[in-house]
Image (tube, helix red, strand yellow):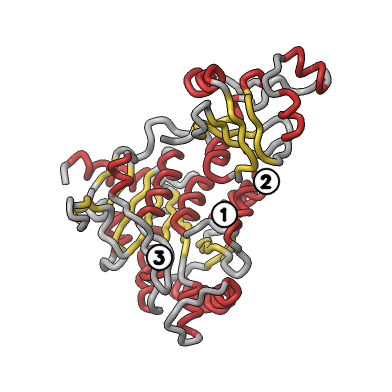
Amino acid sequence: MDENNLAVRRELLKSARQVVVKAGTRLLTSQEAIAELVSGIDVLRRAGKRVLLVTSGAVGMGMRALELKRRPKELAQVQALAAIGQSRLMAIYDAECRRRGFKTAQLLLTAADLRNRERYLNVMNCVNAIWDAGVLPIVNENDSVSVSELKFGDNDTLAGMLASITDSRLTVILTTEQGLRERNEDGTLGKRISVVKELSESVRAMAGGTDNSEFSIGGMSSKLHAAEIVTAAGEYLWIADGREKGALEKVLAGEDIGTVFLPRARRIPGRKRWISFFSRVSGSLLVDEGAAKAVREQGRSLLPSGVKFVSGAFKRGDTVEISGPDGVPFARGLVNFDAADCLQICGRGSAQVHTILGPNVDEEVIHRDNLTLNIP
């Protein structure tokens, strides 16, 4: 590893006041493994870091409690295992943290908690209040009530979202891999990538597919999605092998383990990050070439005259996707009209819009302040 990359890691740790740590199910195989994780968190806290832990493992803990070897396929059974396992998981965390002199707080979230802007802000305020109290927030997806349309998909994504919400300088994802690795021509894994400066297509190709097991759901592709969210916020993500003894201590020391993803040069503001990664798309607008160019290249608002087709049953304030003449989505934003009104005014000039809907309506279908381009 060259000196520049080593310097990046060490400077990062100096500047990181708030750190999100995510631990995967495969690392949480016993009370001893959890104790090792908590020991590393304790080191970060003693170094003055405000730590938030995103933990998996509730379903796996429930399976162990009932001595099951296979993960059930029925949703209700998985939800029951999560309920059985979550209390046991938290009991172990709480005991290990108390042994080291600090307390824990449990937050169980669903995707709906972050898709709603008001609830999103409430989560942010709650985490900050827990930190102010000197307590460790421990977050997991609420698998007992989550259904497919309300799920994050995996806790890597949840960790990335929480890092974005809390403006955490560093997110550490502890996994059972050495980090991101090159792929050889025969498909086997090659050498570890120490630093990723840009999430290019070649980097994404290294991720492969998901890596599901009886106890866990996820894989390197989900970690790259988390990196996309974190780096868009102007922050760093570090994938490290949690099986290594003292993994978090090595991260704190800036050692050459795992893979560090550097932030994007241009940070996306918080509100636009919420639109990009958190809000749920409720419809779509197809625009002409002139409108696509104005939005994409000139940073303009989307006007009714450029809209050619409206799809979906969205309401005012919902998030919609914007596609060019080729039908490929290139942006999304918060719409100023419901779908019925959009249908009435698409392709119309401002004067016609006011004639149809009245003099006090917005001139833009989506204002540029509520519009964000898709990340390539």
Image disc number at residue 24: 3
User: In the image, 194: left or right of 125?
Assistant: left
Does the CB distance between marks 3 and 1 fall below 8 Å?
Answer: no
- Please give left or right for residue 6 compared with residue 337 in the image: left
Q: Horizontal and vertical percent for residue 152? A: 53, 56
Q: Residues within 10 Å of mark 1 (few under 14, many from 20)?
A: many
What is the secondary structure assignment of the residue under circle 1? helix
State whether residue 89 is above or below residue 368.
below
What type is the residue that disc 2 sits on?
Glu
From the viewer's side, name the closer residue of 331 and 16. Answer: 331
The tag earlier along the polypeptide, 3 or 1, is: 3
Relative to 370, residue 49 above or below: below
**For marks 1 and 2 on the same chain, the one whose residue lies earlier in the sequence:** 2
Q: Secondary structure at mark 3?
A: loop
Q: Is residue 94 visible?
A: no
Which callout, 2 or 3, points at the residue further toward the start of the chain?
3
Q: CA distance from mark 3 to mark 1?
A: 21 Å
Q: Which residue is mark 1?
A: 127
Q: Estimate the x, y position of residue 250 in percent, counting from the top left.
A: 27, 58
Picture residue at 50% right of the left edge, 75% below the top: 89
Which mark's residue is nearer the viewer, 3 or 1? 3
Query: Residue 193: where, in percent of width, then height?
Result: 23, 49
Residue at 76% over, 33% down:
340
Spatial separation of the CA atoms under disc 2 and disc 3 = 29 Å
Element type where label 2 sits in the image: helix
Considering the image in quadrants, where does the C terminus appear?
top left
Q: CA distance from mark 1 to mark 2?
A: 14 Å
Asked whether the beta carbons under mark 2 and mark 3 sit within 8 Å of each other, the answer is: no
Relative to 311, is 160 on the left or the right? Answer: left
Q: Residue at x 51, y 63 (%)?
A: 138
User: Which residue is identified by label 2?
Assistant: 118
Tell me the kind of residue under disc 1: Val
